[in-house]
Image (cartoon, rainbow, N blue to C red):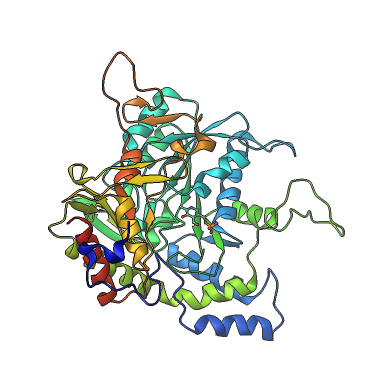
Amino acid sequence: MDFKNDIRFRGIRPFEKKLWLSSPTIHGEEQRWVDEAIRTNWVSTIGANINEIEKNIAQYVGCRYAVALSSGTAALHVATKLAGEKLYGMARPNHGTLEGKKVFCSDVTFSASINPVAYEDGEAVFIDTEPDTWNMSPEALEKAFQIYPEVRLIVVAHLYGTPGKVAEIRRIADAHGALIVEDAAESLGARYFLPMDLCTDRDERAEAGNVNGVDGWWVETGALGDYNCISFNGNKIITGSSGGMFLTDSLEDCNKVKKWSTQSREDAPWYQHEEIGYNYRMSNIVAGIVRGQLPYLDMHIDQKRAIYERYKAGFRGLPVTMNPFDASVSEPNYWLSCLLINSDAMAPHVRGEKDQLWQHESGKSSPGEILAAMAAFNAEGRPIWKPMHMQPIYRSNPFITAEGNGRARSNAYISGKGQDVGEDLYRRGLCLPSDNKMTAEQQKIIIDIIHRCFC
Ligand SMILES: Cc1ncc(COP(=O)(O)O)c(C=O)c1O
């Protein structure tokens, strides 16, 4: 479709500079710490920047220890491996710690959340999403434990900066003796209200609260699991250009991750190895960028919140909703603003494996049309993460919904096909330009473009 010559979009001019989904927002202080690392010759995977951010981020999140790593994916790998080792023991060199084991995993997330299960030779069982926060459904998780009671590990992500239903998930995990790997890659700075009975002594360093007569603590995401991970990828709420972090209260786990991430050297005068190692440590240069960004984390969250609220106000009257959260128990970091088109306002839009077709219908629109319209005017959006259970690589892995087995649900002799929540979000949703540097005027134009898509 030629949007620029479409009468619906008359008068709108493409943005001169591309509006990004979420790009790095650099303040200048980053330069100081990078320069300092170079000036003092600490251009390595050790140095003051690493020490500082480990201390400061552990303090911010409310965990005792932090290990700076080369990426969030690396953090998720060591977290998943640690959990596997704790549950099933040390693996032989050519075997993963989760070999032959199933792991319950968030379904609507980036593949990096759950690929480490496969790195460790485990089998991801995908758990459907709930519509209230777009995260792992506790009902589906409960169902999954009925079907696979032997499972002892859960990998939970907080989508787009909105905490999932952590209290319910924690209660289910505890009831089944399962551990939680928390993927807070997208949600650094988001908080969640944990009722007192679920709190540990660590949580008492967070802010006390009372929600609906229940006492508890507001706990940061990244401190809610047994093994916790964050990311400093270039598109995240603060960045190091890349990088990630493993967060824990266990000194033993902290030391193990430091060892694994620096090639697993034993205490010997030569290179002696008793376990597999990785080159996963963060560079002191990258840590310098994170160090310069950290003072601006709360400012970035405020900017992202303002973006979310402007979209919400701007979409009034349109048949859409935004990525939801329960304000009584969670404070998102608003990393990405998203919209969901009402079912009855969906114009035809079908996706194949790598291509798509959509068609305009008056009064309706589709993610395909809106993303194409924004792209035509030089603004970047993105589809909602394609659920992992729909990905070709994981097509044969189990998938559990609140009703039970999410695979093989249709029957040639019975009409009607149950649709899972994740598939529905993917079909009707999209991520909007959410860059901190987007001005209110620019955002108004984005909102205008989306209104015109529905004309
Ligand atoms: C939910 C989620 N998990 C994990 C990652 C991986 O982090 P990294 O890119 O730092 O490896 C990302 C983003 O990149 C993510 O969005």
Name above or below for residue 375 compared with residue 44.
above
Q: Is residue 329 left or right of residue 290?
A: left
Query: In the image, 174: left or right of 79?
Result: left
Answer left or right for 21 relative to 277.
left
Q: State the image coordinates of residue 123 (x, y, percent, origin top left).
A: 55, 33
Q: Nearer the viewer, residue 127 or 273?
A: 127
Name the spot of residue 227 as percent of width and height, x first. Answer: 51, 49
- Going by the image, does 212 lie left or right of 91? left
Residue 193 shows in this picture: no
Q: Quadrant of the N terminus?
A: bottom left
Q: Residue furthest right?
A: 270
In depth, the one of 440 and 279 nearer the eye is 440
Number of numbered labels in the structure image: 0
Residue at the outermost left position: 317
- Residue 281 at what x, y percent from top left? 65, 62
Residue at 51% across, 35% down:
394
Q: Please say if 411 is above or below 435.
A: above
Pick the front one: 256 or 348? 348
The answer to whether residue 252 shows anywhere in this view is yes
Q: Could you tell me residue 66's position as x and y percent?
A: 55, 61
Is 123 placed above or below 339 here?
above
The residue lying toward the viewer, choosing from 179 and 285, is: 285
Above or below, comparing residue 22 to residue 255 in the picture? below
Quarter in which the C terminus is drawn? bottom left
Residue shown at the point (75%, 39%) measured from the top left: 93
Residue at figure coordinates x 24%, y 51% from the top left: 365
Q: At 34% from the left edge and 57% from the top edge, which residue is drawn?
A: 371
Residue farthest toward the top in the current orientation of the protein: 413
